[in-house]
Image (cartoon, helix red, strand yellow):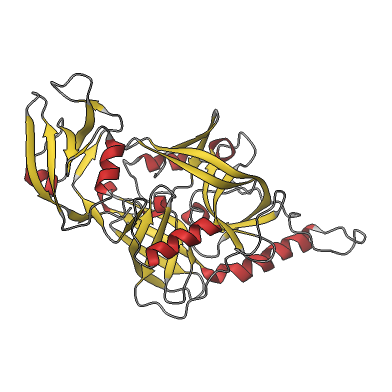
Amino acid sequence: MHGGQLTTGNEPLWPLPPPPRRPSHHVMAIALTLAVVTAVVLTSFVVYGTGQGPGVPTAASAAAAVAALAARVDPGLADVTATLGYQQATSAGTGLVLTPSGEVVTNNHVIEGATSIEVTDIGDQRSYQATVAGYDQGQDIALLRLTAASGLKTVSLGTSSPVQLGEKVLALGNAGGLGGTPAEATGTVTALGQSITATDQNAGFAEQLTGLIQTDAALQPGDSGGPLVNPAGQVIGMDTAASAQFQMSSGPAQAFAIPVGEVARVAAAIASGRSSAAVHIGPTAFLGVQVLPDAVPVPGSPGTTGAGVAGVSAGTPAAKAGLVPGDVIVSIGGHAIISAMSLRSAMDAYDPGEAASLDWVDQAGRRHTAAIVFAAGPAG
């Protein structure tokens, strides 16, 4: 989902991709066009001040209240930096520390395509190498495990009471990928149960995220995976998307978070190793092709489509099988492939080291079949 467009009705939205720190040919580079603007509403958290009469907060007292709340939550957060080896880029996001031993949950799109991941814990200021325990692409949730971590501070998950419309919230995260003390953005819950469609323009993936919390907190790229917090310091959601209009300073803030109950459910399934049609456990199977975003007509087979091969990485299973740019993948493991998205879904059922049959059609309309063994590939 890196850099993919999102829509609710006619309004384009953007996921909160980790902003690239080096030039990249990936669509994530679109994030660089987004204005880095923080619109902190200092009076969102009401604290009684002095000098303005009883019950009227001063800007200083309101800011102090926000800072105090953030200070309670910050030690349970982490900065996530992913190296995207095949895109020649690095990227940054935010994570929620769930266990003292270093289980950290973040958005899948933060680590998607990563060949290595480093996590800096805010609580102890140490950096750790991380592996991907598993992910749910459809829910945009991934669970990381830190190497040799212990005694970490954790976040408090607010699962005891329902989120209310108009509830005051604080969003925290690695805004702009700058690291260090998490940035703050305050606001309110403006809608519940929202649905958005996420489309990766680079790979043609379209996914529906549902049941989201909508807020007017001014999120920024890099805040992905960060917490949406209530005044009690409990995490009520994990930030995942913000409106392009706000990011371009052309409209009010409109942001979305995955409810914490869903985050906790998926993280628990991954932590226990329970795979399903939605949840993938462990490393990602790798074929080694770059595919066109749109479904491609199969040469010699009118009315049928497949996943068009745009590039093949040297030394990968696809290269060993003989695929070349211009080929169209039509089947894997006996399952029909009709688009880039269906190839992605089919691949998610496999683990590195597993074998499958691969069928493709070349530009002359000749059909080919090969047995391939999946390699271990980039995360997500």
Side (left or right) of 268 relative to 351? right
Query: Is residue 244 placed above or below 376 in the rendered structure?
Result: above
Query: Is residue 291 placed above or below 50 in the rendered structure?
Result: above
Query: Where residue 285 sits in the image (x, y, percent)?
Result: 22, 53
The answer to whether one can see residue 57 in this image is yes
At horizontal 46% and vertical 76% (from top left) the residue drawn is 100
Query: Where residue 276 sits in the image (x, y, percent)?
Result: 34, 55
Query: Is residue 50 placed above or below 253 in the rendered structure?
Result: below
Q: On the image, which quarter does residue 56 sit in? A: bottom right
User: Residue lying furthest top in this view?
Assistant: 302
Side (left or right) of 76 relative to 52? left
Query: Where residue 235 sits in the image (x, y, percent)?
Result: 59, 62
At horizontal 66% and vertical 61% (from top left) the residue drawn is 161
* Total residue callouts: 0
Side (left or right) of 61 relative to 23? right
Query: Which image quarter is the N terminus in?
Result: top left
User: Residue lying furthest bottom in this view?
Assistant: 151
Query: Where residue 114 sits in the image (x, y, percent)?
Result: 31, 55
Q: On the image, which quarter does residue 44 sit in? A: bottom right
The answer to whether one can see residue 226 in this image is no
User: Residue lying furthest right in this view?
Assistant: 53
At horizontal 51% and vertical 73% (from top left) the residue drawn is 123
